[in-house]
Amino acid sequence: MKLIIGLGNPGKQYAQTRHNIGFDVVDALADKWGASLNQMKFNGMYATVHRPEGKVMLLKPLTYMNLSGECVRPMMDYFDIVEEDIIVIYDDLDLETGKLRLRQKGSAGGHNGIKSLIQHLETQEFNRIRVGVSRPPVGMKVADYVLSKFSKDEEPVVEDAIKKSCDAVELALSKKFLDVMNVFNGA
């Protein structure tokens, strides 16, 4: 079984913010696949989807971003999912808004959700889809920026990034992640 994890924060006040782009991608996949994230376990909302490529679980940890690993590790243990079979989707300040960068390993790069996953998984080696949200304007705190919504001008770019992220996940269900990286990192 594959586990697709979208990082974000629970609650209406965080919906459609930069920090919740991972949630947005998982929601888009659920809509596309006709699934409903209506199951709860280990403080995470999830759905299991039967696809031609096999079973896929969509997961949104409800632990708040900084504690994402506290949900993901028990889910992986309970459902017997190994690191090679997960894809984590999250926001990245170091990429221009709407740009994607896929990686198989690496440090947290200052992202607290990834820091929590690395701590709880005890490895930096897991597949990631980083979705660019750009850096905050001069004088704006990073925390305020990532918890802000996208501007009207950014919305079409973000919608395209969500669609491309969904495409990358779907391709990763039937191809090696390295091959998926080669397709999407060059785009």
Image (spheres, rainbow, N blue to C red):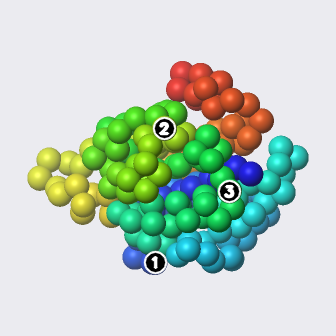
Q: Find out whether the residues at labels 3 and 2 contact each other: C-beta distance under 8 Å.
A: no
Is 54 in front, or is 159?
54
Q: Residues under labels 3 and 2: Cα distance? A: 17 Å
Point out which mark residue 80 bears.
Answer: 3
**x, y (%) of residue 8?**
45, 63
Residue drawn at (45%, 66%) of the image: 70
**Residue 20 vs residue 112, the one in the foreground:** 112
Q: What residue is shown with label 1?
A: 12
Question: Disc number at residue 125?
Answer: 2
Secondary structure found at label 3? loop
Image check: 121 left or right of 96? right
Q: Nearer the viewer, mark 1 or mark 3?
A: 3
Which is nearer the eye, 152 or 182?
182
Q: How many marks?
A: 3
Q: Secondary structure at mark 1?
A: helix
Circle 1: is it few (<14), some (14-19), or many (20+) Cα within 10 Å? few
Vertical position of residue 116 compared to residue 187: above or below: below
Furthest residue in direction right, as rendered: 52
| Other residues around mark 2 within 10 Å, as few (<14) / some (14–19) / many (≥20) | some
Q: Of the numbered discs in the image, which one, if any, rests on residue 48?
A: none
**Which of the 4 quarters of the picture holds residue 24?**
bottom right
Q: Is residue 64 above or below residue 155?
A: below
Residue 152 visible in this rendered orientation of the protein: no
Can residue 128 be spotted in the picture? Answer: yes
Q: Are marks 1 and 3 in contact (CB under 8 Å)?
A: no
Left or right of 53? Residue 57 is left
N-term mark: 3 or 2? 3
Estimate the spatial distance between the alpha carbons at disc 1 and disc 2, rounded to whole Å. Answer: 32 Å
In space, the residues marked 1 and 3 are separated at their CA atoms by: 32 Å
Quarter location, residue 53? top right
Considering the numbered disc 2 on the image, is that residue within a helix, a strand or a loop?
loop
Q: Is residue 89 left or right of residue 18?
A: right
